[in-house]
Amino acid sequence: MAPALAMALALALIARSAAPALAIDPINWSDYPANPVLASGDHQPSRPSVAFDPNKFGAAIGGHAYLMWAQRGEGGGITVWGSNDGINWAFRGQAAGPSWPNQFDFSKARSPRVLYDPGGFGGGTAKFKIWFWNGTEARGADGKESGWGIWHASSLDGLVWVANQSITGRLAGNGFRVVGPADVIYQPGAPNSGASPFGYSYVMLYLVKDGRDNRIGLSLAYSANGVDWTRYGSGWVLGPGAAAEWDSRNVTSASIVRNPDGTYGLWYAGDDGTSGGLGLGIGYAFSNDGLTWTKLPSGPLFNPILKLSPGSWRGSACYAPRVLYSPAKFNGFGDSVYYKMWYSGRSGGSYAIGYATIGPSYAFYLPSGLNSLDCRGVGADALISLSTSTDGTLAISRSSTSPAGPPPAGLRSLSKFISIESTGLSISWPATLRVYYEDSEVPPDVDPASLKLYRWDGSSWTPLPTASGSELGKKYLQAQITALGAFAPMGNALNVQVYQVRYGSASYGVRIVTNSTLSGFLYDEARQLMNFTVSGPDGTTGYCRASFAKALISGTPVVFIDGREVTYAPWSANETHYQVYFLYLHSAHSVTIGGSNTIPELWAPQLPAAIALAAAALALRRIGPRRARIPLSSYGGAIAENRRR
């Protein structure tokens, strides 16, 4: 089902419970086709925490726009990775810090959640802060602190950590256990006062296990300094689902985002106890205040929105989402979208990290030099070849609707609009753009022979000198371009006429697609003949493609123009219908379509003389040697075009 329809159903279901409105479409995630983006041997990356900075973190670790901290499988240890597009990752090292007995040994750290603040979190020297689980289930008990299962540390570069310490605060009630952080939000400038948790600098979602049945849910705490925490409420803010739900056992690793309209989105892993406690998939919940949450309904259209994929890299588990929102669409570093997700998958004992976006745009980091970027694998159906003298990013997206103005009068698009943007690239023009398509993508009211590539020049669609060809089972249109922007294959609009006729007691439709003006359509039921007139600019090539029920003619299709049989009028058939195609040079012509078994007689004198001539021509056809045919040479290029079809 289309995402828009799925969302409409979701909203209809949610409205019954008077829940808060959705801020975004959380269902329409585009999974990166070449997933996983990170699957590195014995590093076994899992449970990612990702940060983005368009200034590359002050060149902290190799000058990357994205940094990722990933747990080693389900054991201890945190590896650090860097990327400039969020897709291609380079290993930067192992997170390290002082060892026991004074501070926690980072080789045992799990479930990292890392934040970056260029202002040092209020003026400090450390730009990075991390919260992680030490692997111990901290038991809650009345009157005792129980937050020590979660630790906190600071760093100048995101790789070497200092001042790591157990957080404080009674974060679990009696009989419950804290089993690690889920996500942390930093709110600079918060007053750090009042009753609302979101009035404080730090807000944390964390995992709490119920000791009675070992189910896990999410609780919430807040802090002014990131170390000393106060629990909100007395239980979960988002707990497991009801019996038989996909998340009936656990709600675990999660990512929270404050949307631009002030609402909150929460992506979380859930399972029913059959995935080893990791996750059967990733679900979505939303909230107006970050405190009261509503899950999307369970089912194939909704939760979980990302699922297990048997036999793939996430065949055993799908969990641990990390979602980032960028109002600037990540400033040209990778895909130009507002929301990006990195998440964990497991297949047997192998761990990997995948990538998804909200929106069908993909971006690629290109080095200087000659580049040929084939984007058929990511759904754009385009290939671009260009030479660059600088490094940068090329973003390509495809849409079924025009990102600019509508097609010019007389043209139709293939509903395939390709938008190309660059950041940081110095391009040596011209470049070559190739857009692929299949015959099934050409609408029936578009002339395939007229297809060209068009570019939006800021005010109108301009045709480009276009070559055509085929490759790997697809046709393509290719043009030299001297600027990026929006491109689309378009062709001449055809005249499509549908006539309803009767034969016997039944009614049938006759469909004629033509680039001519068509008039005077008549169906002679007694003689089973279709008659009409075509006209167009003198000297141009005209054509008709007529589709009709087999019952309307006797025998196989025969076409006459101005009383002469067309010797090259190829036809095809299925169980019920014929389709016949023929060409001519424009002026005004009378056309008759009948069957090979028809024996026409001269019909009523009130009919046009041209139609009478066509009937006489059919009579001549039965006589044999005296019948007149239109020779192939009479139509020159028109026949050649017909043969190509």
Image (tube, rainbow, N blue to C red):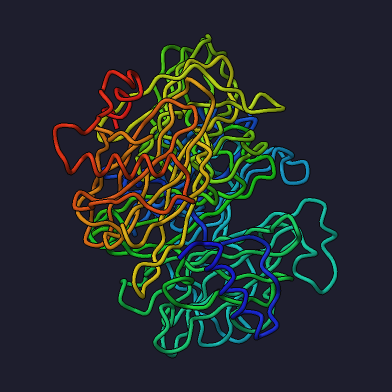
Left or right, 323 with respect to 477, comes to right
Name the quadrant containing residue 273: bottom left
Residue 450 picture location, percent across and down = 45, 28
Residue 199 picture location, percent across and down = 80, 64
Left or right, 145 with respect to 383, comes to right
Q: Is residue 307 above or below residue 542?
A: below
**Identity of the residue drawn at 56% across and 60% down:** 255
Q: Is residue 527 above or below residue 155?
A: below
**Identity of the residue drawn at 58% across and 79% down:** 172
Tell me the quarter of the image containing the C terminus: top left
Of the pair 471 and 247, the residue shown nearer to us: 471
Of the pair 350 and 459, the residue shown nearer to us: 459
Residue 555 picture location, percent across and down = 19, 54
Judge whether residue 147 can be spotted in this image.
Answer: yes
Q: Is residue 52 above or below residue 191?
A: above
Residue 300 picture location, percent across and down = 41, 73
State the count of labels: 0
Judge whether residue 37 can be spotted in this image.
Answer: no
Tell me the quarter of the image containing the N terminus: bottom left
- Residue closest to the far front: 605
Left or right, 33 with respect to 232, comes to left
Of the pair 443 and 510, the residue shown nearer to us: 510
